[in-house]
Image (cartoon, rainbow, N blue to C red):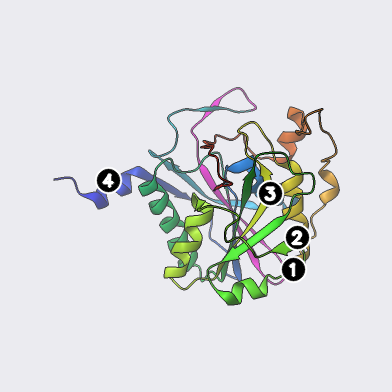
Amino acid sequence: MVNIEDYTKKKWQVNKLKSINKKNLIMIEGLPGMGNVGKIATDFIIENLKAEKVIEIYSHSFPHCVLVNEENLIDLPKIEVYQKPLKDKTLLLIAGDVQPLDEVSCYEFCNILLDTFERNNGKEIITLGGIGQQEVPKSPKLYYTGNTKNIIKKYYSSILNNNLYGVVGPIMGVSGLLLGLAKTRKIPAISILAETYAHPAHVGLKEAKEILTYLNEKLSLKLDLNQIDDSESNDNNRKVIDNQKLKKLMKKPFITKINKGSETDYIG
């Protein structure tokens, strides 16, 4: 008989590189998904604030491929955890190349993150992502939802819309499941979602900038958002971004799988 606990331990390789600062720890998650909005935003925070890597996570549940890095060598796909101590808090930033590919693995991965968060006395969780639209939004709206009324009240802003019911389907992937599992552990968690174009090739740069503008003010991050130029577009109003510019905004290339449907949907 297969021992599920032993299988899970082999399935997930969690390399702890440094200790995590426990001062008012806030987790921010942004992995590949719709428009890669969350990934772009989180990678930008990591690069702009010069956060340090504390954990690397590899898994059999990640895509069966390798990525070619800037030195023309290969890397296995992984998810990385960074930290950035600030004056009154510490950010714990979840970034990476991929998301878990199946439902069971997604639950396992989210519980690994939550176990780590609880061990380090984490306070709150923020997940980032996009709401898929059939056309490129000219002025992307920001929506938010959370697992308690208090966390929604705390992160209230006039630029955020709380009327998600009937607007989006289920929030899929890590960005959604992390909120639900955090609720079972009584950890306050919130998700910030930007309207984006539901096309696998779309890069939601403008949408990510909207989220970053909100977080910059709400969390007093002091990000230099002038580094993001979202003015370029082609005749179809889809973003045109050269490879060098994208590399500055995103730490790594991304692998994402998006299921397109007829309904407005969100994929973590």
Instruction: Give, as a three-letter code, the residue at label 3.
Output: Glu
Quick one: SS at disc 3?
Answer: strand
Q: Residues within 10 Å of mark 3 (few under 14, many from 20)?
A: many
Q: Label 3, label 2: how many angstroms apart (C-alpha)?
A: 14 Å
- For badge 1, the amino acid type reads Ser
Give the residue furthest to the left. Answer: 1
Residue linked to disc 4: 7
The answer for how far apart the CA atoms under marks 4 and 3 are is 39 Å
Identify which amino acid the numbered label 4 is placed on. Tyr
Tell me which label, 2 or 4, sits earlier in the chain.
4
Q: Which residue is mark 1?
A: 157
Q: In this rendering, which labeled residue sits more in front, label 3 or label 2? A: 3
Front-most of residues 34 and 261: 261
Residue position for label 3: 195
Q: In front of the other: label 2 or label 4?
A: 2
**Could you tell me the amino acid type at mark 2?**
Tyr
User: Badges 1 and 2: C-beta atoms under 8 Å apart?
Assistant: yes
Q: Is residue 176 above or below residue 187?
A: above
